[in-house]
Amino acid sequence: MPTPGQPLPATPAASGERIEASEDIVVIGRLPQPPIPPSRVPAAVQVLDADELRRAGLGGLPDALAGQVPGLSLSDEQGNSYQPDLSFRGFQATSVTGVPQGVSVFLDGVRVNEPTAEEINFDLLPTEDLERIEVIPGPSVAFGRNTLAGAINLITRRGKEGGAATAEVSAGSAGLQKYRLRLSGRAGPVDVYLSGTQTQEDGWREATDARLTKVFGKVGFRADGTDLTLSYQHADNRIAQAGPLPASSLDSNRSANYTAGDFFAPRLDQLALNGRRDLGDGFTVSANAFGRLLHVEQFNVNLIAENSRLLSRTASAGGTVQLDRAATVLGKWNLLTLGFEYAHSDVEVSVFGDRDLDTSVRDRQDALAAFLQDSVRVAQGALRDGDELILTAAARWDYIRHRIADESPGTPGREDASGAPAFRRLDPLIGLNYNLSRDHGMYASWSQGFRAPALLELTCAGPAAICPGLQAGTAPDPPLNPVRATSYEVGLRTRPRPWLSGQLSAWRTDVVDDIFSVSPAGTTGVYFQNVGRTRRQGLEASLRGKLAGWLGASASYALTDARFEDEVVLATARRSSDCTGPSCSERVRAGSEFPLVPRHRAHAALEIQPYGWLSLFFSGTFVGAQRLRGDEENVAPKLDPWFSLDGGVRASAGGFVAWIRCTNLLDARYSTFGAFAPNPKLPGTPVEPFLTPGRPFQVFAGLSYGFGSGTYSAP
């Protein structure tokens, strides 16, 4: 089974120390840093090896994260295989706008949260080309804004010594066909990695076909203390969306599509240059520069109002420079990091009704930041031989400015959304690690973070500026305040045996001016508002082990409690579709639970390898009951808890690898998402729960052949 990290051979660190082979390594910044073990990071860092995850039968990136990171769960509002909603510590990372986003995602140092609404498009990420995944919980000085729950840092592969080629074909339920080719190699100081993937699927629900085309390439150079990489990513996708179904018709046909015709069609081109240079005396300088161009077409069928078509273009460019010094200062280990970053984004969003242009908004965004972090061993051998006390102190300053131009057609009563709101914030971090030994330790941290309102939130910021179906709005009145978070965390880590490791953490995040989307009754639109004080808190525990090289197991559990701390009045679609005035609102009392945050989540996995060429794997996930969106006042029944069991087998011989993977082995019927909405297909257009059904039993199989050094292919 995957371990919390990837072993690093004993190599001299820049400070003159040695990192033991049994320790894991982490990179706690966006850019490469001198490697340090997790025992010196004041957080429950998870470092996942991508090859280990694939060998364990886990599918794409979201599935892998949900299977290995406590407190992280998935739901499915869009009703397809490629646009999941990720929930972590009560915050969201999703392609759907209108939810409390609070997770930052980075790909080789480049932030991939979209500047329109901080959303994440998982279908655009080169998930099969990853080498390592790092999950750093809590607000982070190095990763910056929008890192309220934590950051997900993705590091892609590069060519290894020699040459290798792998071809893979796979097929399965719902008409899945997938073809993939990978070439890689290294000769002298130059390494090359290239991959192409074509995926087609009919979808298990009606009118949910998908086509994904991805190309990823990376060229690297390493010599004499210099490390350079240039990567290019292209994605051209078209994904049909089913969405949730009315509860009244869910049992009769779980594969139905309530509004057939919805689709999401993004096209992405991204170029990233990363470099690192050893300067001597423990100093290293790292830098990256990127350019990113994204075109999106989103079409939504609407049974109450006009259909809508959103066209957006986002061009982003920027870079980060970072100076590190890993050295012994006054006889004490020390790692100092100083960094600066800048990014500029040009965003154009147009929304059309059936034929006419409804909204046209442009935004010029500038984001600047400076950060400083220092970790130092302040004591060693104070209480017992071999112990150490590590102090980490950091601060980050962020400045974000929007220049919004409302070019929408003139309409009586429409307010002009043009403006230049700016947000700035200085966030600190203090952390302590006390390590009894290399295998046992504890930590505590206090940190702050913030998230500035995004473009689509600023232009949909009140009842007079309702957005049509989570699209661009028309007026920044009243204005939105930035989200501010203060996080506290304590934790333990232990490795009682070389084959067994565990982590336990308790955390709390207090938030001021959380941004929620609210939906008035009788509409399909939303607007955004601040909701005062909220709180997320919880416990997370994980245990992993591998015995005798043939039996691996892991288990994790998370308790997440997310609540409103202030009373707030919200519009809600849960009221009757013909209500007016205050009767359309809900009064949310202090202490009410957040919607779509499961209180309990547990996961267990088992891998059996009776022979070197044969592996069997099983995993089970339990997700507890959740409130439906639109029931923030907690008066309606909850979404039922659910359990799903997956399994599969993998066999290899020579350069061939064959695998079979099954999802929902028990064919359990459950729903992963729920919200209240009017149902115009019934007389009187009553409001009822809309639920997204979970996948039924499905089977997928694949075969790959590779030759050369370092070849590997898996699900």
Image: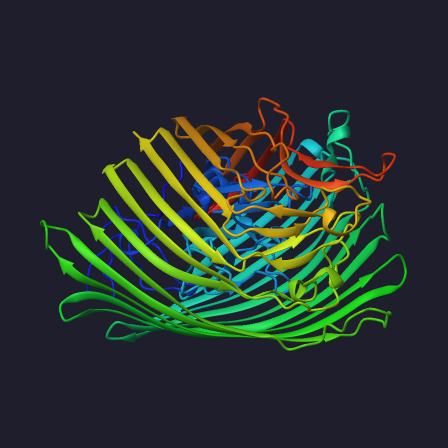
Q: Quadrant of the C terminus?
A: top right
Residue 366 position in % (x across, y down):
57, 76
Q: 577 or 666, which lies in front?
A: 577
Seen in the picture, residue 234 relative to 679 is either above or below; the reply is below
Quarter where residue 541 is shown: top left
Which percent across, then down, holds residue 669? 64, 25
**What residue do we see at 17% from left, 55% from top?**
388
Q: Which residue is most to the right?
A: 355
Residue 151 visible, this orientation: no
Residue 418 appearing in the image: yes
Q: In the image, is 231 to the left or to the right of 473?
A: left
Identify the residue at image location x=46%, y=65%: 144
Q: Nearer the viewer, residue 212 or 99?
A: 99
Identity of the residue furthest to the front in this view: 582
What residue appears at the point 35 percent right and 36 percent down from the top-left corner?
544
Does 306 sit left or right of 296 as displayed?
A: right
Q: Position of residue 370 (x, y in %)?
A: 42, 74
Left or right of 598? Residue 537 is left
Residue 648 shown left or right of residue 8 in the figure? right
Q: Give above or below for 631 relative to 462.
A: above
Q: How many marks?
A: 0
Relative vertical location of residue 479 with respect to residue 204 in this rendering, above or below: below
Which image quarter holds the N terminus?
Answer: top left
Residue 180 percent coordinates (x, y)? 61, 46
User: Which residue is drawn at the image coordinates 88% and 34% (left, top)?
Assistant: 683
Look at the picture and state if 553 lies above or below 216.
above
Look at the image and name its color scheme: rainbow
